[in-house]
Amino acid sequence: MYAVTLALHNLLRWAVLALGLWAVLRAVLGWARASAWSLLDRKAGLFFTIAFDIQFLLGLLLYFAFGPLARAALSDFGAAMASVNLRFFALDHPLEMLAAVVLAHLGSALSRKASQDKARHRRAAIFYTFSLAAVLLAIPWSRPLVPALG
């Protein structure tokens, strides 16, 4: 199960990145152009958060059920903090991704609650941008970019 879950987690990052970029671009352009908030704007944020939620759930499975790195780190947390690789997967990556998921959901929720279209786009642009930036910082770029080819 570990190999399958890890492969899905690695592949889904591309969907999260693409959908996050789409949501950010729609929000920034809508804000800059002062355009009306559309169903497509809403769907961009919705698809981004849904893909991210699935990605986060796969990450939780890797962390708590299947992942040998997390298991090794949790068995001796003090020693894991001394190892750059173990610390990244035991602490840095999960916390940064949790923050990114929260930011994506805040962008979605706060943009829905805004009463004016410009405010909707502005809120979505700010929160989706911060979420996408956190994702880009937290991705383990040393892993194969396409798992089947790595």
Image (tube, rainbow, N blue to C red):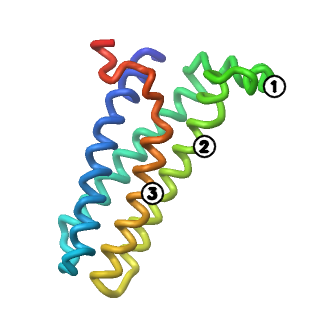
From the top left corner, tell me how far across and down residue 9 is, in percent. Answer: 40, 29
Above or below: residue 116 compared with residue 78:
below
Disc 2 on helix, strand or loop?
helix
Going from the N terminus, do you reach mark 1 or mark 2 first? 1
**Dividing the picture into quarters, in which one does residue 69 lie?**
top right
Above or below: residue 23 compared with residue 28:
above
Going from the N terminus, do you reach mark 3 or mark 1 first? 1
Q: Residue flagged by tag 1: what amino acid is it?
A: Gly
Distance CA(mark 2)–CA(mark 3): 14 Å
**Dividing the picture into quarters, in which one does residue 77 lie?**
top right
Q: Label 2: how many residues lie within 10 Å, few (<14), some (14-19) or many (20+)?
A: some
Q: Dots 2 and 3: beta carbons under 8 Å?
A: no
Q: Label 3: how many residues lie within 10 Å, few (<14), some (14-19) or many (20+)?
A: some
Image depth: mark 2 or mark 3 in front: 3
Distance CA(mark 3)–CA(mark 1): 31 Å
Seen at 33% across and 18% down, the residue is: 147
Disc 1 on helix, strand or loop?
helix
Dot 2 corresponds to which residue?
95
- Left-right relation of 40 to 88: left
Going from the N terminus, do you reach mark 2 or mark 3 first? 2
Image mark for residue 130: 3
Dot 1 corresponds to which residue?
78
Seen at 26% across and 44% down, the residue is: 18
Disc 3 on helix, strand or loop?
helix
Distance CA(mark 1)–CA(mark 2): 17 Å
From the top left corner, tell me how far across and down residue 54 is, in percent. Answer: 40, 41
Seen at 19% across and 69% down, the residue is: 39
From the top left corner, tell me how far across and down residue 85 is, in percent. Answer: 61, 21
- Left-right relation of 111 to 99: left
Residue lying farthest to the bottom in this orientation: 115
**Dividing the picture into quarters, in which one does residue 76 lie?**
top right
